[in-house]
Image (cartoon, rainbow, N blue to C red):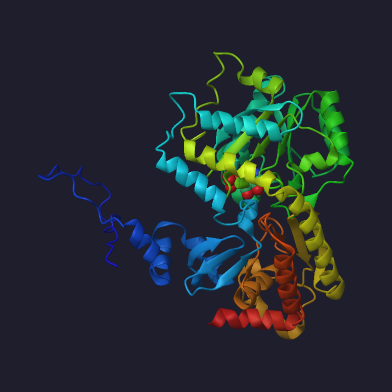
Amino acid sequence: MNVMTKPDTAARPTIAAPALVPGGIPKPALMTVEQAKAMDVARLTDLFKAHLNPGQLHFMKLLGFHKIKIERAEGMYYVDQNGRKILDFFGGFGSLAFGHNHPRILEARKKFQEEKRQEIAIAFMSQYATALAYNIAQCSPGDLDMVFLGSSGSEAMEAAVKVAERAAGPKRPKIVYAENSFHGKTKGVLAITDGSLYRAEFKMADNTVRVPFGDIDAIERAFRSDPEIGVIVLETVQGGGGIIQAPAEFWQKLRALCDRYGVLWVADEVQCGYGRTGRFYAFEHYGVVPDVTALAKSLGAGKAAVGAMIARRDVYMKAYGTPKTAMIHAMATFGGIGEACVTAIEGLNVLYDEHLIDNSADTGAYLLERLKAVQAKHPKIIKDVRGKGFMIGLEFHDFSQTLPMVLRPVVSVLDDKLKGSLSGFVGSLLLRDYDVLVAFTEYNRNVIRLEPPLICGREHVDRFVEALDSLLSRGIVSIVKDFVKSQMN
Ligand SMILES: Cc1ncc(COP(=O)(O)O)c(C=O)c1O
């Protein structure tokens, strides 16, 4: 394939405006869609390094992911350049409720394109954005009726925090967030995302108060001692923290505390919502309704970038309910874009038509039960198995202090991220030897996250559990040796 890369401009920091030439401005050496599809792994690696993220490639290499180019994806599987089918228990961190390329989603998009429908929803009212907002309100309990549409989880959470902050008013500007929280990496929500790596060297908003996750007493102390607190933001199940659930009684108490102190509760359901835990929203397990919530990931049905903020009507009206305030946080250029909305509308219909939330509850419980049996068989390797529905965390013991002496020098030369952590080794070998993909966890390197598509059946669970059991049966020493050997190839 003949694609030129740009000349090195470092030597000439100022560039003259291109002269207009007869025949028009010449086309740069652009790649076509067909050339993009046909790229081989070596070329892909070079261009990824040159133009996307060289540092990320380092981690892909550690785990052996860099040798793989996905050609197709269907249902529960990716298919790589060699025709190998990879079972997807990663599910794009919860973005693939319907698996890959669900036929009804593809059909809805194809029809929309063939009918040449309008896309940008700014000048005129969009029937697609309106129908999607209506559908989301139908799926949402209480008066969670008002919807803002954007194109990512971070954007949905930015909207959620902003609507709550405005509704709380200028005398209550402080926002409580939790330890080990993850709400996105855009500048605003970074201030309530607890990852020091993500925040380092950025100036954060200073109106935030951090509390331990699930600690109702700490929250009450904060509310009581600081009348400026107006908002609390919590993931209902912490994903990046390692699939952490608060005690069941926490949520009722939180609702009562928020009502007593007049604090608005924002529930981040970007990862745990959309049926993942066996209810449409995870907070529905606890019989409570927040003031504001947010969805993204699977809302786009695996084909479109859609995020939504959903607010109680009175909260929304307080923030943006007049003509003067209506545009303060409205009109994201791509929010409510036609094909994305149609994708999301069809997705919500498929979610209920195919009983995928029920499947998440039932088959998720089966997965949890089978994993507990694997834990009982390998108690020295697996420390904990937890979660709800298809949002499950598998925590390994930290072996940094317990590794046999002979292996310590071998492991000590590995990347810092891998020391003391079995999850990298297990994830990498599951992919290499068993064609199974799992996810890692932002803040806890000992936890593997399992968030398969909600279409996952018992046969997929059986295949996954048998692969995991077989790998763990090798024992820690062999797992470490096999991983280290894989690094040499
Ligand atoms: C709970 C939660 N909130 C917000 C986000 C941000 O979503 P996005 O990556 O679409 O911006 C994520 C992403 O993983 C998430 O898990």
Q: Position of residue 334 (x, y in %)?
A: 47, 36
User: Against 347, is 121 above or below?
Assistant: above
Q: Residue furthest left?
A: 22
- Left or right relative to 71: residue 475: right
User: Against 389, is 78 above or below?
Assistant: below
- Residue 433 in sight from this viewpoint: yes
Seen at 41% across and 38% down, the residue is 115
**Foreground of the two, 208 or 326:** 326
User: Against 444, is 321 above or below?
Assistant: above
Q: Position of residue 9 (x, y in %)?
A: 28, 55
Seen at 85% across and 70% down, the residue is 373
Splitting the image into 4 quarters, where does residue 191 fall?
top right
Q: Position of residue 420 (x, y in %)?
A: 72, 70
**Foreground of the two, 171 or 246:** 246
Seen at 85% across and 30% down, the residue is 257
- Total residue callouts: 0
